[in-house]
Amino acid sequence: MIIKEVLAELELKDHPVAKALYKKEGFKVLVLGFKQNMILKEHKASVPTKLLVLEGAVTYKNEGTITTLNKYDELEIPVNELHEVTALQDALCMLIQG
């Protein structure tokens, strides 16, 4: 019920909501919920990560590049690359790390 929890919690927040869907040593899957215009501020991934958009649309911004990701689009996030994610519309994403 993690996705439902993210969506319910998102209704009360003014920032993106993330919860672990699956976690094992060296590997995890996170569900990330956004309302339109929410920003996941600049940060770096310390492990190889893939961003998958399940619903909605987001932009992925790194040094000098902005990539729009729509429903079912995916993107590899390089380790230690400074980036941010902004919701173009309400969005539900999955982060696969490890």
Image: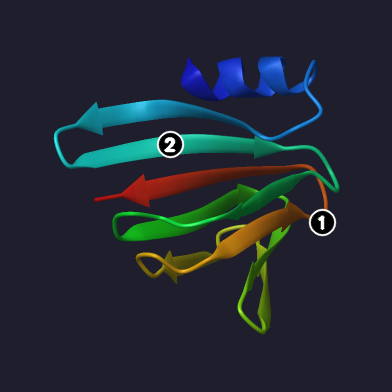
Element type at mark 1 = loop
Q: Residue at x 50, y 35 (%)?
A: 31
Q: Which residue is mark 2?
A: 30
Q: Say how the picture is coloured.
A: rainbow
Residue 89 vertical placement versus 30 (above, below): below
Query: Which quadrant of the figure has residue 35?
Result: top right
Number of callouts? 2
User: Which quarter of the figure has residue 29?
Assistant: top left
**Which numbered disc covers residue 51?**
none
Which of pointers 1 and 2 lies earlier in the amino acid sequence? 2
- Residue 93 in percent (x, y) is at 56, 45
- Residue 86 image point, x, y percent: 74, 55
Q: Amino acid at mark 1?
A: Leu
Q: Is residue 19 left or right of residue 49?
A: right
Q: Nearer the viewer, residue 39 or 21?
A: 39
Residue 8 at x, y = what percent? 69, 15
Residue annotated with mark 1: 88
Q: Is residue 52 above or below residue 2?
A: below
Q: Residue furthest left?
A: 25
Q: Secondary structure at mark 2?
A: strand
Q: Residues within 10 Å of mark 1 (few under 14, many from 20)?
A: some
Circle 2 residues within 10 Å: few <14, some 14–19, many ≥20: many
Tell me residue 62's x, y (percent).
Answer: 60, 73
From mark 1 to mark 2, how far is it between C-alphas? 20 Å
Residue 43, compared with residue 23, is above or below; it is below
Give the amino acid type for the residue marked by disc 2 in the picture: Leu
Considering depth in this image, is 24 or 83 the residue closer to the camera? 83
Residue drawn at (81%, 28%), measured in percent from left and top?
A: 14
Q: Which residue is depicted at the point 30% across and 29% down?
A: 22
Residue placed furthest toward the bottom:
64
Rendered position, 73 above or below 90: below
